[in-house]
Amino acid sequence: MSDGAGGGARAGVGGAGGAGGGASAGGAGGQPVAGQPRQPVVPRRSASLLLVRDDPLRVLMLRRGSSRGAFPSALVFPGGVLEPSDAGLAAGHVARRGAAGAGVAGRAAAGRAVAPPDEAASLRVAAIREAWEEVGVLLARDASDSHLAGSAVPTPVAAGAGGLAGVLDAAGARLALEDVVPFGRWITPIGGKRRFDTDFFLARAPEGQEPTADGVEAVAIRWVRPAEVPDLRSELLLLPTLMNLRRLGSFASVAEAIAGAPRFPREPVTPTVSIGDDGTPVVRIPAAAGYGVTEFFPQDPGHFKLEG
């Protein structure tokens, strides 16, 4: 275990973080029909949000329930699949920002390398929505441009049928899409039964809100310092989670991370799995992705060690 970001931690060979952070790789999709090649599963677009705080720099993570269908018991960032309602929220709240929307427009423009502007905004909405649904933290600003806090941020259960749109309307607020910056994009390897094409985003956690586990998607939460990842020996950390923790660990503060994130390559990462000369599987990611590590060696069907 030569890589500091992954030393000792159990890590899934997953390729993307949507709906929880990854999926197993390498021939995991069942057998094709005799005489017919099995068509790769089309990955579902999804988003995941790294909510970060200072003193010291740390990121909010949650543990999936053991009965959850996607990545049970994994330690992940809040996230999930893109929903049809996300596009409507994106359109409505980008419009509400109006002439003051230069920040949103700039962020959307930065995302064009990986998604059309409308999808880029929708993915930001998905990341914010999932964080609210899973841990009760909502990145939204009121008419004075202050973050919502306290009673203005009800839990999803308390929000009732009105959902996120109702919360925003009641507070005269908009989603803070301009606070969310791209941090990476991972696609589950070809061959998996479940595939996700996930944009990871980074944002400063708002003051006046404390995360809580919803007891369904998230059974526990914790703030994790990137430097402590080698000590998470009992945790299941999916490959995209591990690599984005490694990336976050290259910064000393939230401000530094947010300022530095746009400089990372916008290269979507699709891990590949092959068999080495000695018969052992090797997972590889492209050097152009900018993570500093390109090869991973599975120790069993679901876990690997890093060679940096």
Image: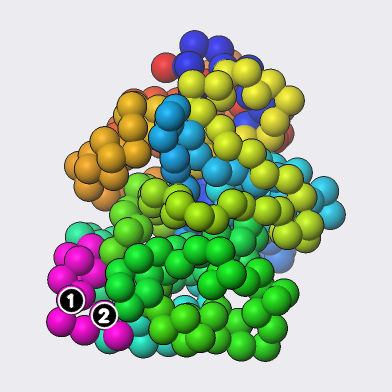
Amino acid bearing label 2: Arg
Report the quarter where the N terminus lies: top right
**Residue 143 percent coordinates (x, y):** 32, 78
Side of 86 relative to 95 (left or right):
right
Mark 1 neighbour density, 10 Å: few (under 14) some (14–19) many (20 or more): few
Which residue appears at 61% of the width and 61% of the height?
136
The residue labelled by disc 2 is 97
**Residue 97 horizontal side relative to residue 77, left or right:** left
Extreme residue in the top direction: 2
Q: Is residue 106 magenta?
A: yes
Residue 220 or residue 46, whichever sits in front: 220
Q: Amino acid at mark 1?
A: Ala
Q: Quadrant of residue 145?
A: bottom left
- The C terminus is located in which quarter? top left
Q: Residue at x 67, y 88 (%)?
A: 161
- What percent of the width, then of the height, locates residue 15? 52, 46
**Tally of numbered discs:** 2
Closer-to-camera residue (170/307): 170
User: Mark 2: which secondary structure?
Assistant: helix
Query: What span is colored magenta in the figure?
Result: 96-109
Q: Residue at x 26, y 74 (%)?
A: 117
- Please name the residue that numbered disc 1 is placed on: 100
Please tell me in which quadrant of the rendered image residue 107 appears.
bottom left
Magenta highlight on residue 262? no
- Separation of residues labelled 1 and 2 (CA atoms): 6 Å
Comparing 114 with 279, the one in front is 114
Q: Nearer the viewer, residue 214 or 130?
A: 214
Q: Are marks 1 and 2 in contact (CB under 8 Å)?
A: yes
Q: Main secondary structure of the magenta part?
A: helix
